[in-house]
Image: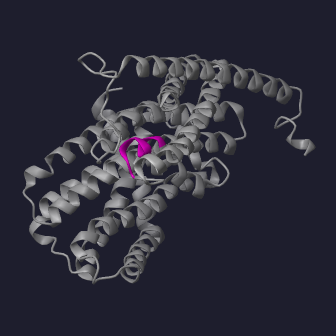
Amino acid sequence: MRLPELLRHSWTVAAKDLLVEFRSRTAILSAAVFVVLVLVVFNFGRDPTAVSNVDLAPSILWVTFTFAAILALNRAFQLELENQALDGLLLAPIDRSSIYLGKLIANLVFVAGVELIGVPLLALFFNVRVLPYLGPLTGLIALATVGFVAVGTLFSAMTVRTRFAELLLPVLLLPFMIPPLSWAVLATGRLLAGRPLSEVVGWLNMLAVYDIVFVALAVLLFPATVNE
Amino acid sequence: MPAAIWAELAMIVVGLSSVFYLFTKDPRLDRFAASSAEVGTVFCAIVLTTGPIWGKPIWGTWWTWDARLTFTLFLFLLYAGYLLLRGAVTDPAARARFAAVIGICGMCEVPFIHLSVYMFPTLHPMPIVLKPSAPSLPGTMLLTWLLSLGVFTLLYVGFVVQRYALSYLREELEAVGDVGGGRGHG
């Protein structure tokens, strides 16, 4: 299948998902409230005199994003279980890869929305200066998010059809999230401490490699998760 | 240490046989991958228990977030996820496909974990046998090490063969109607 067609089909699938989400808005609202709650809980779970906010902020940010993303990922294919919607989607005359890419795009938009709420709240609650580093921070968050959402979308296609889907997805996904997450935490720490950009380029490159490898792998493997 | 090497190699075996499974759909390859994963889990458990026991008197601590210890822990968690997924899917064909997907992802994940943990400080010595110059391990130690590597290789092969035979019998049992390999009895 040619690339423009693949992308067009992917966008159709993504637009469908996003429209469903936009009409109901329940998932994004719950995720937003969840992010606020996690940040508030973190506030009570720390000793501000022992560790300075700037040192703690990267971990808080990424732990929050991890949990929020896992909640979001479960939703993507759960949606298709009702009324056997997934069968309808599979019967559509489009490539299986474009179904995966569509789901990936929709998930990315969803997680990006959550992160859009999370970063300003982190800056507000923990008094961290993010504005001077907004550009590189956005790039870093984008790179890390693409990596783990790509793997998560692939895994959630499998776990929704098992028992204990909500529990199994994090169990499978967290070992895969740890490398990008650890790089992202280290790089965020450097950025927020005002270190020069050249210090984080190495991590950004590794995140980019991770993204390329796992997006390609997921596109190739996705048909195996839905074949009947 | 030989157990750690085989714990890692077992993941690659799982990944490779998963790749071939997706192409050929041969149930034998799926059974082989599952056997290798289970033995890999056991080897990880060996490393994770004997490592701290040795580390306490030598390094003075049971656990440290040391590069190789962390790496083995990740590997253990990968295997755990793989086996949990196998347990959660009831349809054998879907189970094999899902497990293959996780197996392949796991294999591709190994180099990334390697990279990320080598950025952490380590208490372990740097590679001394497999390096560009000649091995710097004293001859007797090298001999001991190679011997134990050989023993663990045999152990791995032996375990996988046993486990493979077992899963074959269990599938036969499932085929004649006793679903779950005797779970019905109790």
Numbered range of the magenta stretch: B65-72
Judge from the rendering whether residue A123 lies leftward or rightward of residue B91; answer left or right.
left
Q: Is residue A69 magenta?
A: no
Question: Looking at the image, which residue is at 16% across and 71% down?
Answer: A130
Question: Looking at the image, which residue is at 12% across and 60% down?
Answer: A135
Rendered position, A32 above or below B119: below
Rendered position, A163 above or below A38: above
Marks counted in the figure total 0
Place of residue B150 in the rendered image (x, y in percent of width and height, measured from the top left): 54, 17
Judge from the rendering whether residue B86 lies leftward or rightward of residue A74; answer left or right.
right
Judge from the rendering whether residue B7 lies leftward or rightward of residue A63; answer left or right.
right
Place of residue A27 in the rendered image (x, y in percent of width and height, measured from the top left): 47, 68
Q: Main secondary structure of the magenta part?
A: helix
- In the image, A54 versus B69, the foreground residue is B69
Report the coloring of the rendering.
Answer: one colour
Q: Residue at the right extreme?
A: B185
Is residue A91 visible from the viewing direction of this image? no
Place of residue B141 in the rendered image (x, y in percent of width and height, measured from the top left): 42, 22
Place of residue A129 in the rendered image (x, y in percent of width and height, measured from the top left): 15, 74
Question: Looking at the image, which residue is at 65% across and 55% down?
Answer: A164
- In the image, B88 versus B15, the foreground residue is B15
- In the image, A117 versus B153, the foreground residue is B153
Rendered position, B51 above or below A188: above
Is residue B50 visible from the viewing direction of this image? yes
Q: Is residue B69 magenta?
A: yes
Question: Looking at the image, which residue is at 36% across and 26% down?
Answer: A1
